[in-house]
Image: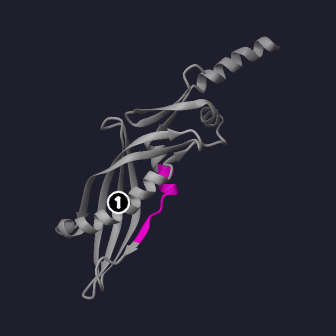
């Protein structure tokens, strides 16, 4: 009987030496867990509101970075008329794994690009959008972008014994500690 268990244990441990998190999985996780709605009044009689509508993720396409692109709706209310714009921002950061809470965080966040639609609003919105992006940057640098699922046996095993995170084109890969 014991001889029958050994091959199964070897198969299971071989399957659990790494876990891959794809761009789509990370994108879905962020979409489900990240909501940003911010209001500010940059000038008297002017009210601005930004709502995050969509998140896109690109992993490992520019070095060992994760790029997070957000599409937000921006409404600026002025005494004359409201202005509506779509704001697209791309942030680049380095992912790192924190074993204490089995989560991936981002550090060294940098703004890669900010664009507005309609294009005529690009100039005036640069200052306001940079301020609004502070909320997104703060969220991404202080909240995990992914936490290993303790209900999935493979992820739980990696949470207990894994420590290494590597960046591949289109995916993040967790590995068991070397020597384990």
Residue 47 visible in the shown view: yes
Question: Magenta span covers which residues?
Answer: 28-38
Q: Which residue is labeled 1 in the image?
A: 71
Using residue 9 as the reference point, say whether residue 112 is left or right of it. Answer: left
* Residue 107 percent coordinates (x, y): 40, 46
Residue 127 vs 148, above or below: the answer is: below
Circle 1 SS class? strand
* Residue 72 percent coordinates (x, y): 35, 64
Residue 137 vs 3, above or below: the answer is: below
Using residue 134 as the reference point, say whether residue 161 is left or right of it. Answer: right
Would residue 34 be counted in the magenta stretch?
A: yes
The residue drawn where x is 24% and y is 64% is 116
Corner quadrant of residue 44 = bottom left
- The quarter in which the N terminus is drawn is top right
Q: Which is nearer the eye, 87 or 142?
A: 142
Residue 54 visible in the shown view: no
């Amino acid at each position: 009987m014991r001889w029958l268990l050994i091959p199964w244990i070897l198969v299971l441990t071989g399957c659990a030496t790494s876990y891959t998190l794809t761009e789509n999985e990370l994108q879905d996780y962020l979409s489900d867990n990240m909501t940003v709605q911010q209001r500010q009044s940059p000038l008297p009689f002017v009210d601005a509101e930004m709502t995050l509508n969509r998140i896109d993720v690109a992993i490992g396409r520019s070095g060992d970075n994760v790029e997070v692109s957000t599409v937000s709706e921006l409404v600026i209310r002025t005494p004359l008329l409201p202005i509506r714009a779509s704001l697209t921002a791309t942030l680049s950061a380095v992912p790192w794994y924190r074993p204490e809470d089995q989560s991936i965080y981002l550090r060294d966040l940098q703004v890669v690009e900010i664009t507005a639609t309609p294009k005529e609003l690009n100039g005036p919105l640069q200052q306001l959008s940079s301020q609004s992006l502070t909320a997104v940057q703060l969220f991404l640098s202080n909240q995990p972008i992914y936490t290993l699922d303790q209900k999935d046996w493979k992820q739980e095993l990696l949470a207990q014994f894994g420590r290494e995170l590597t960046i591949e084109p289109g995916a993040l890969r967790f590995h068991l500690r070397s020597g384990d």
